[in-house]
Image: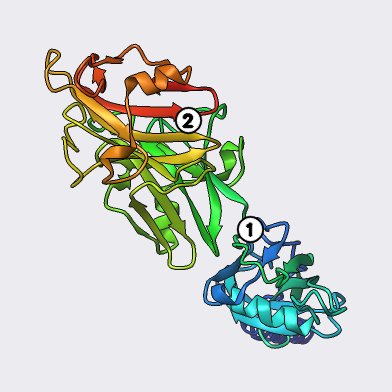
Amino acid sequence: MKKITILALFVLATVGFNSCEDDDTIQFIAQAPQEFTFSNSFLSEYILTAAASGNLGERFTWNDANFDVPTIVTYELQKSILGDFSDMEVVGSTTENELSVTIGDLLDYARDAGLDNDPATEEPNTGNVSFRVRAFVGDSGPEILSPVQILTLLLPEDTGVNNPVCDLDQLWAVGAGVPDAGWGWTTPVRFACSADGVYSGNVNLQNNGGVDNNFRFFTAEGDWNSGLNYPYYIGEGYTIDANFVDAMDDDNNFAFVGTSGYYNLAIDTFNKTIILSEPQPTGVCEFEQLWAVGAGVPDAGWGWTTPIRFVCSGEGVYTGSVNLQNNGGADNNFRFFTVEGDWNSGLNYPYYIGEGYTIDANFEDAMDDDNNFAFVGTTGMYFLTIDTVNKTITLD
């Protein structure tokens, strides 16, 4: 019995020793991963021009691939022209959660797909390229593929007409800092695609001492979720006009800290700048602008060094910001002119009355030698509109 017992103990010890050796060489085997997918939003189509080759085309982002154990995961962005990935090519690989392609890259893919922008050829100017992400562990470990994302590429046809090309038809702005819009969608301010990659327009900007001077850009009219705030543009590497700062409010809106007035605002997505300048004609009128000089517009005075300009901003509509002065009936007169520097092109108060205009009550006939306008309101900065269609002159 003792011999049997000792033998049994020996066998058990041997088994136990081998088990310990096995424990020392145990390897964690990754379990079947869960599905993962792209996490960024995609455009309905990608408009591609050679001038924008160096610009960002798309930043692909994705959520983590879950292999159920802590491990380093490599991600590989793949593309396919055919769509079934039998022609798969690797765009790039990373251990992070994003990879970017430029407009130039997308143009190369468009050429690979046989697209061109010549309307005289049979080749299409629009087509699709498919993308997916492969997540894998090691050289021979488990892997998972994301769902396929199809991008529609568009090469604007060369018609011989220089039509500007932007990713969107326009951008929008609303907020207290753009008082013509305010915080609502009834009258948003529109910045149209005015040149390749450039959105611009004239805008009335307000700065009430740091109060009610905030606003935000939007890519879709009426969609609050499409907002682009100050940090967004800083993050994209934009140089922003010094008249704008981060409002540091709940939405980190733009804050206008300059002098209230009428400006031309341009958002250049190629050179990555947001710039303010003098307002520019943007509508259809008899004249590109009207001018005002006189004591009642003290920033101009009775001379042509710094006349006040009201640009054509709509169908027969001239608008602009103007500092109006009323010193108790003295030095409050001025006149409009159709040609800068030409005293003979003046349009006085009786002219507009004779044309059937309804004129703001803050103006009256100065009853001086030239029957100029007289400003009889409260001295200050105003937004003036001369509507030649509805025949009104109004102040806001």
Question: How many numbered discs, if any?
Answer: 2
Residue 138 position (above or below residue 155)? below
Q: Residue 117: image x %, image y %?
A: 74, 75
Q: In this view, does 130 lie to the left or right of 62?
A: right
Identify which residue is drawn at 54% across, 63% down: 197
Left or right relative to 83: residue 324: left
**Element on which disc 1 rests:** loop
- C-alpha gap between disc 2 and disc 1: 30 Å
Q: Residue at x 22, y 31 (%)?
A: 209
Picture layout, residue 198 above or below residue 338: below
The one of 249 and 216 positioned closer to us in this rendering: 216
| Figure quadrant of the N terminus | bottom right
Question: What numbered label is drawn on residue 106?
Answer: none
In the image, taking residue 120 as reference, residue 391 lies left or right, namely left
Classed neighbour count for the residue bearing mark 2: other residues with Cα under 10 Å, few (<14), some (14–19), many (≥20): many
Q: What mark, if any, has residue 40 been given in the picture?
A: 1
Residue 17: horizontal and vertical position, in percent? Answer: 66, 85
- Give left or right: position of 154 versus 301: right
The residue under label 2 is which amino acid type? Ala
Q: What element carries label 2?
A: loop
In the picture of the structure, the residue carrying the numbered disc 2 is 181
Q: Is residue 321 above or below residue 104?
A: above
- Graded by Cα atoms within 10 Å as few (under 14), some (14 to 19) or many (20 or more), the crowding at tag 1 reads few
Q: Which of 395 and 44 is in front in this view?
A: 395
